[in-house]
Structures are given as structure tokens and as C-alpha cells.
Image (cartoon, rainbow, N blue to C red):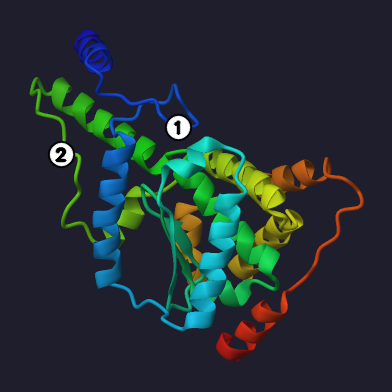
Amino acid sequence: MKRIATIALALFATGCFHTTGLNRYQPDMYSVDQEVGMGHEMSKEVEKETTLVRHHALTQLVQGIGQRLLEHSNRPEFRLYPYTFKVVDSSEVNAFSLPGGPIYVNMGLVELAENEDELAAVIAHEMGHVAARHATEQMTALQLSQLAMFITLSVVPALPPVAMEGTRLGYILGVLRYDRSMESEADELGLELMESAGFDPRGMATMLKHLEDERREEPVMIERLMSSHPLPDDRIQAVEAALAKEPEDRRSRGSSASFERIKVLFVKD
């Protein structure tokens, strides 16, 4: 254990841990530039194994929501990343973000949303994961645990490479499994983003309830989302508690006309 502590201290001393971002004291082996580059490479692999929706109106809707959230963010950490927002042609209820900004929303989740605020909640939540650097924090923790295992076996390897070239979708999503504290932080950041951008933050609570209902009715269709984004009851309660502090006169605008038109075009019976 002394050797592990010595190497960990050496890594900190030589600047192998980066502290840019919201969680400045959380170990992270990646710089923002490395994170962005890694996300770019990962997105190439993701798009080899998925089919993206190319319909202009739908992609413009999702990109417009994402850009609106970003432009109204009050935190400079969100502006560190070149976010992209794309729709995956899959009926599976899922959404995920990659290091450095790429965000993907499945059609199954778009169909589940009843209004623009609920779709904004999903996108804002994923943006929260990116700004909080949850992906590279997870990767750092994984690499440190592997390093500790090797040290225990009296083998001190070089640190794993920064780039993760050649990864595939299953492996990528397997790495990006967030714990409850990360989900809670992404919810908090998402609520903040929604409010600053003029979306009704109550859309996050109603979307979480839709997901909970979907888990009970169609657990297979939501299995991947639940494995990477835990949805315990206390997560819903925490969001509702945060919403209780909002002004009483907040009113939902409901679905926009463009959202309703797109739902008619794309939602499957």
C-alpha cells in the first residue's frame, strides 16, 4: 500500500492529474484537449455501429435545444467543449454523451418525450455529465484500480494510453457507467441549465417519471439506459425537492408547434 501511495503522489506531483472543470479536486488524468480528442475518436466508432437520423427538422430541433442550453449557461465550464447533438435511429430508450461534448439521443427517447421541456431535460442532463467530466473521472478511476492491481503483483506498467482508438459502442457504453452521485450532479446541472435557458425545469421530473413507468412496462427497451444511468426513487425525489424551491408562478409552455409536427412525423404507433 505504501508503494501505491508513493506512485499516486508522484503522479500528482508530475501533473498527471488535471483539475479543470467543475470537480477541481477529483482525480482526472486527461486534459480538456485530450478529452475532446478522445470524444472525437469515440464518436467515429459510435457512428460506425449506429444509424443517425438525417431528417432536417428533427436534427434541427435537437441541435436547437442543445445550442439554446449552451448559449444560456451561466457556468464557464460548459463552454470548454464543442458540443454536438445527434439523433440515433433506434427505438431503444437511451441517450448518452461522450467525453468532450458529443451527445446522442435515441428516437425511442424522443418519442417518449411529451413536450420540448422533457426533451431539453434529457439533453441538459447529458451536458451536465460532460461539463462535470464524469467520463474521464470514470476512466481515471478505472486506470488507477488497474495500476493498483499491477503494483500488487509487483509489476509497474506504463500508464494506459490517452487515446482509446479502436473502441466499439458496447465497450464505450460499458465504460460510461455513472454512479448515483454523478447522476445526481448531472440532474442538478441540468436543472440549472434548463432554468437559465428558459425551459420549464419541471420537464426533468416528468421525464424521469416517464422513464420509471417505461422501466416497469418495457424493462428490456430501457435496460441499457438504466445500466448506465441509475434511476433510484431518491433521484426523482431529489429533483422534485429542487423544483419545490422554484417560484410558484412558473408555468409550463407545453409542446411547441415544431415539436408537435415532428412527433406526428416520427412517432411510431
- Residue 65 located left or right of residue 39: right
Q: Residue at x 66, y 44 (%)?
A: 192
Please identify the quarter of the rendering in which residue 48 is found: bottom left
Please identify the quarter of the rendering in which residue 173 is found: bottom left
- The percent position of residue 10, horizontal first and vertical second, equals 21, 12
Q: Residue at x 62, y 74 (%)?
A: 112
Classify mark 2: residues with Cα within 10 Å, few (<14), some (14-19) or many (20+): few
- The percent position of residue 59, horizontal first and vertical second, equals 49, 75
Front of the two marks 2 and 1 = 1
The quarter of the image holding the C terminus is: bottom right
Q: Amino acid at mark 1?
A: Gly
Classify mark 1: residues with Cα within 10 Å, few (<14), some (14-19) or many (20+): many
Labelled disc at residue 161: 2
- Residue 44 located left or right of residue 187: left
Disc 1 marks which residue?
21
- The percent position of residue 30, horizontal first and vertical second, equals 29, 34
Q: Residue at x 54, y 69 (%)?
A: 62
Q: Name the N-terminal-most of marks 2 and 1.
A: 1
